[in-house]
Image (cartoon, rainbow, N blue to C red):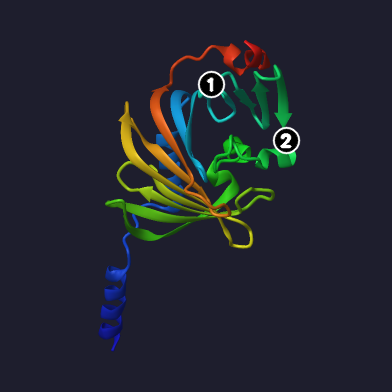
Amino acid sequence: MQKILCSLVLSLFMMAPNWAQTASEIIAKMDENMNAKTQISRSQMVIHGRRGSRTVESRTYSEGSQKAYTEYLAPARERGTKMLKLGDRLWIYSPATDRSIQLSGHMLRQSVMGSDLSYEDMMEDRKLQEIYSLRLLGEEELQGQQVWVLELLAKVEGLSYPKRKIWVDQGYYVPLKEELYAKSGQLLKELTFSEVKAFGDRYYPTVTHYKDALKKGKGTDFILLELALDEAIPEYYFNKSVLKR
């Protein structure tokens, strides 16, 4: 009888998934791959609206997770619009009025130029392990790649998304999909990442599709055109005076 029980336990152990890494280790490696001291990027945001699609092009300079400056380059109606993020503060400059305003509170929930992204989405800067408890749910295949599926539950109050699910590529440690939920469990947004490319010794998805689950429409595509990592950025890019330069 004892031999039978031992054999049964051994069989169950062999059938169980062999997860060599914990959820914390996976997220830590994803952060290590995705985060750099500085980033300089040029990107396009393709907003799919009811009457068609429009493309907004911008250049962004960022230092760590606390400082970011974005200048919009096209189309003509958006050219010269600027955003500056310093910690938990965000300013928007409009060339039409030659004024800059600071967004806070409910204003951060507004859509960025009619896209499926909110200003609040762009403000998130704390490490996931600091604000969420992590759980490894399993493994599966996505976009032809083996991925880990992780569940993240808020351990601090006031988060825009108290629950998240992330599908992380096992080879490159990049997210391939993410679902963002309300406290009630309602799906709020879904992100799909694709076209992973190498930038030096790091890997980044160059196309991200954002879909606000509470809106009709085809969502927003964020396309990374250029990316330079760990290059020196002049300090004036992170000063309020840059908004009127």
Of residues 144 and 156, which is closer to you in this image?
144
> 170 or 45, which lies in front?
45
Other-residue count near label 2 (Cα within 10 Å), few / some / many at <14 / 14–19 / ≥20: some
Q: Is residue 19 visible?
A: yes
Q: Quadrant of the N terminus?
A: bottom left
Against 187, residue 160 (above or below) is above
The amino acid type of the residue labelled 2 equals Ser
Q: Position of residue 144 (x, y in %)?
A: 27, 52
Q: CA distance from mark 1 to mark 2?
A: 27 Å
Number of other residues with Cα within 10 Å of mark 1, as a class: few under 14, some 14 to 19, many 20 or more: few
Q: Give the structural element (helix, strand or loop) at label 1.
A: loop
- Residue 187 screen position, x and y as percent: 55, 58
Which residue position holds label 1? 76
Disc 1 marks a residue whose amino acid type is Ala
- Residue hosting label 2: 104
- Classify the position of the C terminus by image quarter: top right
Q: First in sequence: mark 1 or mark 2?
A: 1
